[in-house]
Image (cartoon, rainbow, N blue to C red):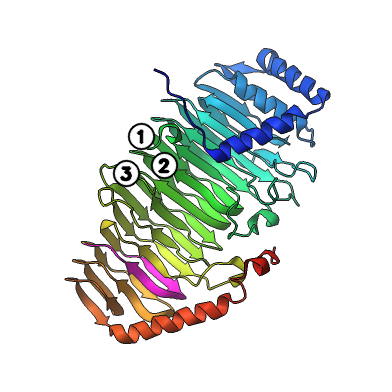
Amino acid sequence: MKTTKKLPIWLLLIAFITSFTLSNCTNEHDILLEDTMDLVAVSAKTINADIVVSPSGDTSGVTDFAAIQAAIESLPPGGVLLLESGTFYINRMIVSFGFEGTIKGMGKDKTEVVGVGSDANPFFGFSLIVLVSPSGSLEVSHMAYSLVDGFRNDGPDGNLGVFIITFLSEDGTDTNFDNLRLTGTDATADVPSWLLTQPYQGIIVEGNFANFPEFTSGGHHMLTNSDFSKQGVQATLYQAFNGASIEIYNNSYKEVKQTNYRFMAGSSVIIENNYMETVAFGAIVVTQESEPVLGNPNKILIEGNEVKTAGFLPIEIGPTPNAEAKFKVSIKNNRVTNLGFDPTQFGLPNLAGISIFEGNNEAIVRNNIVRGEAWFGILNETDNSTFVGNNLEGIFTSDADYLLSGDNNTLVGIGNSTILDLGNNNIYTGMQMLDGASMAENIKAAMKKRDELLSPYTNLEYLQTLE
């Protein structure tokens, strides 16, 4: 029996806006789209069922949009759509449902897709939404995406997302994003992060949404060798994959608000050798869905990343909401630099360079370097975890390198490491234990300092004047 699949509300909103806009197109544009589809199907150079599209030079975005949309619709399952060298301009959202295949360019320094937008149509920068076929695969590689200078980041509600590349993957789908460059503008980088309708300016892979929460397989997903800059919250987001294998490595993030990864039980995740600069919230934020499926614990490896942030939680492993679905975490050989506090970004003084919250288990945290201002170097609420060889130096407002509230942990310090131990049966060597009462006073003073820094920025009306 065929199951009716329910799309996310935000996708339905985007689809409605798209259909409304397209329904109000001029007849000339409709004719152009039909003619271009015929041209792609009949005259485009095809090699082994691959479709090749060349840039038209039309900076209005009408011609290239029609050509790319038509090519995607004409591509056979498993086929390759090649965008040749040059600059493509598109003025509308490209949407495909049931896609399976490859979209690639000649290289991120050779093929560029530019979202032109306009005052009359500010919502559409470059947007590509693809619903990948069940048990299929998708590859997007070797091209750049950007917005024109001065692009306005205000959608129908004043702040709805633009510059979004979204892939909704069914059970078992594999995705591969490689050698991409996504570049926003100063306007997109400055989108206020406190608004609920903040833009998703980057790559979003959302899996198994159709039959949540009864998921089966999440497939294999890779994001490699790509560059992100001048983007808002969630420059990359992997969400709701049960049993997925996900690899994120050798990517660069500059002037982004936050990256975010949310997983279901049973996922295996590697986040390795990335360079990240964020201006609010976290650089590497790994959380679990609020209604996790029971299953094997997630396995998370965060290794060899360099993180620089003026945000709140540079590396964060969020609390797990279900005792049967814990993370098994390894965080090693990372370098975290806390860049200070910018209240105009509505961030907070960094809580800690590395934070692992309650509900997780068996964390191994070793050979990391934390520098700069924060409340603590490492915050840990887990049990049965090991901390060895971490080099923590900075202006820790609380005067503690470690804040420990879990039980049965083992810690080996470097130099004159200090620890506030609020847990039970923890074993540590090479550390100076701090007095809890004195520490409480230090934390209270730090909180007061934070409140002073945030005032008057806690007033939403005032915050909105900072745009």
In this rendering, would 101 be left or right of 220? right
- Is 374 contained in the magenta span? yes
Q: Which residues are magenta?
A: 367-383
Going from the N terminus, do you reach mark 1 or mark 2 first? Answer: 1
Image position, residue 144 (x, y; %): 62, 41
In this view, the residue in front, 277 or 14, is 14
N-terminal-most mark, 2 or 3: 2
The image quadrant of residue 306 is bottom left
* Residue 446 is one of the magenta-drawn residues: no
Q: Is residue 69 visible?
A: yes
Q: Amino acid at mark 3?
A: Ala
What predominant SS class does the magenta segment belong to? strand
Which quadrant, please, contains the C terminus? bottom right
Name the residue: 61% across, 17% down.
46
At x 59%, y 25%, the residue is: 81
The answer to whether mark 1 and mark 2 are in CB contact below 8 A is yes
| Amino acid at circle 1 | Phe
Label 1 sits on residue: 215
Q: Quadrant of the N terminus?
A: top left
